[in-house]
Each structure stands twice: as C-alpha cells, then as structure tokens.
Image (spheres, coloured by chain):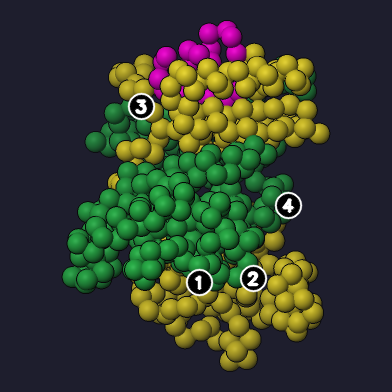
Chain colours: A green, B yellow
Amino acid sequence: MTNRTVFYVSDGTGITAETFGNSILAQFALRPRHVRRPFIDTVDKADKVVSEINQTAEAEGLRPIVFITLAKDEVREILKDGRCKGMVMDMFAAFVEPLEHELGMKSNHRVGRFSDAAKSQEYNERIEAINFSLAHDDGQSAKNLEAADVILVGVSRCGKTPTSLYLAMQHGIKAANYPLIPEDFERGQLPGALAPHRRKCFGLTIDPDRLCQIRNERRPGSRYAAIENCRYEVREAETMMKRAGISWLSSTHKSIEEIATTILRDIRPDRLIY
Amino acid sequence: MTNRTVFYVSDGTGITAETFGNSILAQFALRPRHVRRPFIDTVDKADKVVSEINQTAEAEGLRPIVFITLAKDEVREILKDGRCKGMVMDMFAAFVEPLEHELGMKSNHRVGRFSDAAKSQEYNERIEAINFSLAHDDGQSAKNLEAADVILVGVSRCGKTPTSLYLAMQHGIKAANYPLIPEDFERGQLPGALAPHRRKCFGLTIDPDRLCQIRNERRPGSRYAAIENCRYEVREAETMMKRAGISWLSSTHKSIEEIATTILRDIRPDRLIY
C-alpha cells in the first residue's frame, strides 16, 4: 500500500535523514514511496525540490512527509517558509537549539557530516579494515591473523562474508572469516590456523532448512546443498564451536547490522566506545 | 578535547541513534567520547544504563548527552522518569506524535528497525549484490557484466573496491569494478570487456600525490608507486574516460558515502526512489 511519499532532503548524502526517517516510519503500518534528494546545498536546488514536493502533493492528494537535514539557514528557509506543501520534519531544529544551550556554544551550521571526516585517521582505518577483510575472506589467508580484531567461523553460506565486510566498513573492525568444512568435522578439530586465536573467534550458525535453500540457489541439486548434508554440517559445526568454547549466534532471523552489533557487544565491547 | 560523554541507547542496534546523534554533534566544536548501548529492551537493562550514565555524570562533573531510540513505553520511562542525570534527547517523541496525527493512525511501538526486514526481498537483494560485487572486484570476471547496475573504472587504488562494496551493502546495487592499467593506456582504449557497457560505467580519479602516498604504503619505493607513474596513470585514465564519455569524480576529498550517493544520483537516479 504505497499511499504516501516520503522525501529525505539533505545538503549532504541524505543518509542520516533516511536512516532516521525510516526508523520513525517503521513505527507505522505504512509502506510509503521513498525519495532521497541529496546534496541540496543551494537555494536554487531547494526551490526545485519544493516544486517536486508540491507536484507530488497535488498528484497524490496527500501531503508528503519531508525529513530534512539542512545546516544552511537560507536553504532550510526555502523548505520552511510556507510554500512547501509537505509536512516538514526538521531534524536539526528539535535538537540543535537545546544543545547550544547545554553546551554553552553556538552550532557551526556545517554542511554534511562526512566532509571533514573523509580523510581522517578513522576513515583510513575503515579503508584498511575493508582491505584486510577482503584479503582474509573465506579462509583465503592464514597470514597475519594476529592482526584480526575478530575471526568469524561457520559453515559455508551462513553469512560470514557480508558480516565481515559490514564490520570493516561500518566499524573499522579487521574481520577475517574462516569456513568450517567437512574435513574439519572428520578430524573433529578447528582448523589449525585458528587455534592460537580462539579468543577472538565468533561463530555464526544457521537453520539447516534456510541453508539448504541458500545453497540450492548456488548449486542446485548438489550434495553440498542437500538437506541431509546441511543438517550434518550445522550440527557438527555447533558441536565443534561448543567444544572450543566459541560463542555463536544464528544468522537465520537476524540482519547483518544486528549480527555485527551483537559481535561487537560480546567480543569487542571496547569498540562501542570511542 | 574529550570533555563530554554521549550515550546512544537503543532497543535495536543503536545505529539510527548513533548516525543521527553524530550528525547533530558535528554541528558543534566538540570531540565527545561516544558510548553505544544496543539491545536495551528490558527495564532491567535500562536500569543498568541509567546507573552507567549517572556514574559518568558524577565522574565528569557534566551531564552526559543521551540520544535514545526506544519504542517500548516501560523501557523509555526508565530513561525519562527523572532518575537519569543525563540530558535525554528522545528522538522518537519529537516526530512520532505529529506523524500519528498526520497519518491518522497509532504507531505500533515496534522495537528495532531491522527485525522484520531481515529476510525481506530487499535484504536478500543486498546480500546478492554483495556477492556480485565481490565476484566482480578488480576486473576478476568479465562474465555477467550485463547484470551489473554500475561498473566503476579507474586506476589501481583510487577507491573502487570500497565504493563498490558500499553500493552493494547499503543500496543493493550490483557494482562491478574494473581497473584501468598501463596496457590499456598503451592501446589507448578502454578494456574490451567494458565496451558494450559504457553507459553504466562511472569513473573514479584521484590526486596523483595522494595516490602516490597510498601506493607507497602498499609497495614502498616501487615504480608502481612512484609519483611520475602516478601522474602518468591518472592523466591517461582521465583522458580515456573523457574520450569515452564516461563521467567521473575525484575520490581525493570525498568519503565512500559521498561518492556512492553521487554515483546513484548521476547514473542510477531511479535507485534514490523506492
């Protein structure tokens, strides 16, 4: 039921407006159409967006919801001077003013939250972490595992790769990942390369039916994808992780974001403070 | 100057609270200490967080700033009933109530914004896009390029890989990337595999001095990293992209998020609407 349009209007990427607006809208039984309008940093561009909003209002017969993160007064004014026929939610107004009072300083009306950060140390660490995670995807390299912040383990296709990349990209965490494979189960032991690093290992597991489905998309009808094999691998992997004292969670009903946050909380709580 | 602690308290991952809080705080000349407290979904856990906030307030002699995204009333109450010595910024309160009025419906106080989304079609597309981007990183495969939404081109180490992965992870965009290498410059032509897909190519370039610095971290003192070579490659790549009619931008002063948003806006504006 797409019965309403939501605009995210920002002088930067609009990611903040969109993330926040989405979480507000998730509180309602509504499936709106989303429109992101980034880099709206001049009066001219703001005028165009207002026209677009007003046309949408007319076409749909409902006023669009408009989340804005605009730092420049003259640009924000265009959205707020009464011509815009959307319901404008000014995300800064609600919080910046009380903070100016609390902190005893004026806000600097800085445009975009990434600009200065782009080449900061923190940013470079994120890029380095991405490179590390790529080089250590799927057990590709056991070299330099001592530099890893986290090593994800689990059966093939349980979600290790996206989680590693997310940890690197979002949190600057050097996340290696290492598959548990039938040979490991036969030996009944964790891969040798992991032994010295057991304390930074974290396991992912998955419901065998879901695993079977995912593997069948990749290699339909294979022994690898067969439900009996999926059940065997998952059971063996869980037994092995239990024996090794590795904590784990199931990726079946969790998003990458939730898995990554749980891993941080459980094995790198220091990275939730910075 | 870390003279203030900021808490992000959420019943979900806390990513929304943190993203939003960071962009608000970027408006101030302040370098606070950040503490994220995710999955605070019971009264008990909320009590513990309030104790932590109050201890911080006492130790620092300043009240912490506390951004909250808490959907359950009884949990939110713990943060707002007066015992918490932080300055509580309730991100939902400011917007949910006016929206209830506008939409003519009650909010459902749903916890977390990812829970239901985890196994949605949109989510599966993101995972598929990540796998695609990994398989098509650095020109690894010219197979199936027709399935790509975007193909990033540029010299080695100009930022193609992190941008591709970000596009995939955040936007579900199948982003391949293809290096432009000295052999291409000698032939004076784009890599043959790209010819049929020119319209979905997007170029990245970079300041030669910055490129030299990045390459020297990887292969110190090499011809590859030498400033003359970096200048040559960047100049040739820009000439080639200009001739082929490929639009490009410089990654030198831009974050991954800004580059990705610019690419969407310029070559896949449809993906800003969903």
Q: Amino acid at mark 3?
A: Arg
Residue at horizontal 47 percent and vertical 66 percent from the top: A191
Q: Which residue is mark 1?
A: A140
Q: Which residue is mark 3?
A: B110
Q: Are marks 2 and 3 in contact (CB under 8 Å)?
A: no
- Which quarter of the rendered picture does the N terminus of chain A lie within? top left
Q: Chain of mark 3?
A: B
Q: Nearer the viewer, mark 2 or mark 1?
A: 1
Q: Which residue is mark 2?
A: B157
Mark 2–mark 3 distance (CA, rounded to whole Å): 43 Å
Q: How many marks?
A: 4
Q: Which residue is mark 4?
A: A121
Residue at horizontal 52 percent and vertical 62 percent from the top: A194
Q: In the rendered structure, which segment of residues is drawn in magenta?
A: B66-84
Q: Amino acid at mark 2?
A: Arg
For the residue carrying disc 2, how many other residues have a C-alpha within 10 Å: few (<14), some (14-19), or many (20+)?
A: some
Q: Nearer the viewer, mark 3 or mark 1?
A: 1
Residue at horizontal 46 percent and vertical 53 percent from the top: A244
Q: Nearer the viewer, mark 1 or mark 4?
A: 1
Residue B71 highlighted magenta (yes or no): yes
Q: Chain of mark 4?
A: A
Residue A86, above or below A47: above
Residue at horizontal 53 percent and vertical 55 percent from the top: A198
Q: Nearer the viewer, mark 2 or mark 4?
A: 4
Name the mark on residue A214. none
